[in-house]
Image (cartoon, rainbow, N blue to C red):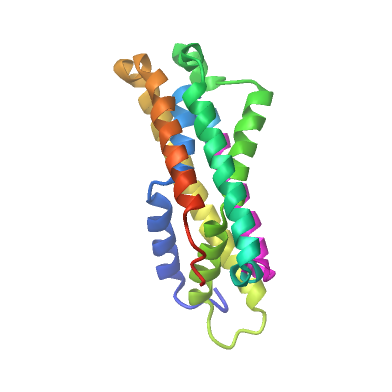
Amino acid sequence: MVGVDNLALFIVAGLLLNLTPGPDVLYIVTHALRRGARAGMVAALGITAGCFVHIAAAALGLSALMAASSTAFTLLKWLGAAYLLYVGIRLLSSKVSGFAIDSGAAYAHPTGATGLKRIFFQGFWTNVLNPKVALFFLAFVPQFIAPGVENKALVFLLLGLVFNLNGLAVNLGWALTSAWLGQRLDALQQRLHWLDRVAGAMFIGFGLKLALSDNPSH
C-alpha cells in the first residue's frame, strides 16, 4: 500500500491487539451466548462503528486536540466511565427469566429489530465514549505511515480501515464461536443467568478503571 511502512507487520499487530479480551470482546461474547449469533454479530458491528468514529477523529486531528487538553480528556473519560458503569449495573440487575435460550430459535432469531438496534448502539457508545481508544489510534497508526507522505490523513484513514476490518473479522469470530458454544453446552445454558452477573461486575470494573486513569499524553 502506497504511503504505508510495513503493512504486514501492521496487520499482524492489529490482529493480535484485537484478539486481546477487553470490554469490547466481553460485550460481544455476552450477547452471543445469551441471544445467539445474530445478536453477537450486531454487537460486533456496533463496536466497529465506534472505532470508525475514533479513526476519523484522529485523522482530522480531533484526537490530538483531546490528548493535549486535560479538560476534553477528563470530560470524555467520565462520560465513558459512567456509561460502562450504567451497562454493568443493568446487567447485574437484570431478571433471570430473560436469559433462557430457546434451543435453535434463539440462534436464528435472538431478538426483534428494536433489541438488535439497542445492542448495536450500546456497543457503539461503549467504544465512542472511551478516550483511550482514540488515543490508542493516535499513538499506534502513525508508526506505520511512511516518512515524507504528503497526505498523511488519507493514509491514516486507509490504515484505520484495514485495522477495523481485521478487528471486525476477529469480533465476528468471537460472536460465532460464543453462539456455537451457547447452543451446545447444556450446562452453560442452565447457568447463563450468572453470565450477566459476571459481565456486569467486569463492566463496572472497566468503568472504575477508566474513571481512575490519567491522560496517557501527560
Outermost residue toward the bottom in this view: 148
Q: In this rendering, is residue 41 above or below 57?
A: above
Query: Looking at the picture, how far across and down is residue 11, in whole percent?
Result: 44, 63
Residue 117's spot in the image, x, y percent? 66, 31
Residue at x 61% of width, y 72% of height = 68
Residue 31 position, x and y percent, is 49, 29
Query: Which region is colored magenta?
Result: 42-63
Q: Is residue 58 magenta?
A: yes
Residue drawn at 54 percent across, 86 percent down: 147
In the depicted structure, whether residue 21 falls above or below residue 74: above
Inspect this view and state whether residue 67 appears.
yes
Q: Residue at x 58, y 88 (%)?
A: 148
Is residue 45 at least partly visible in the picture? no
Looking at the picture, tell me which residue is in the foreground, 72 or 127. 72
Residue 122: image quadrant is top right
* Magenta stretch encompasses residue 82: no
Q: Between residue 87 and residue 175, name the one nearer to us.
A: 87
Q: Front-most of 188 and 208?
A: 208
User: Where the N terminus falls, by quadrant?
Assistant: bottom right
In the rendered image, the vertical position of residue 34 relative to residue 26, given as above or below: above
What secondary structure predominates along the stretch shown in magenta? helix
Name above or below for residue 63 compared with residue 174: below
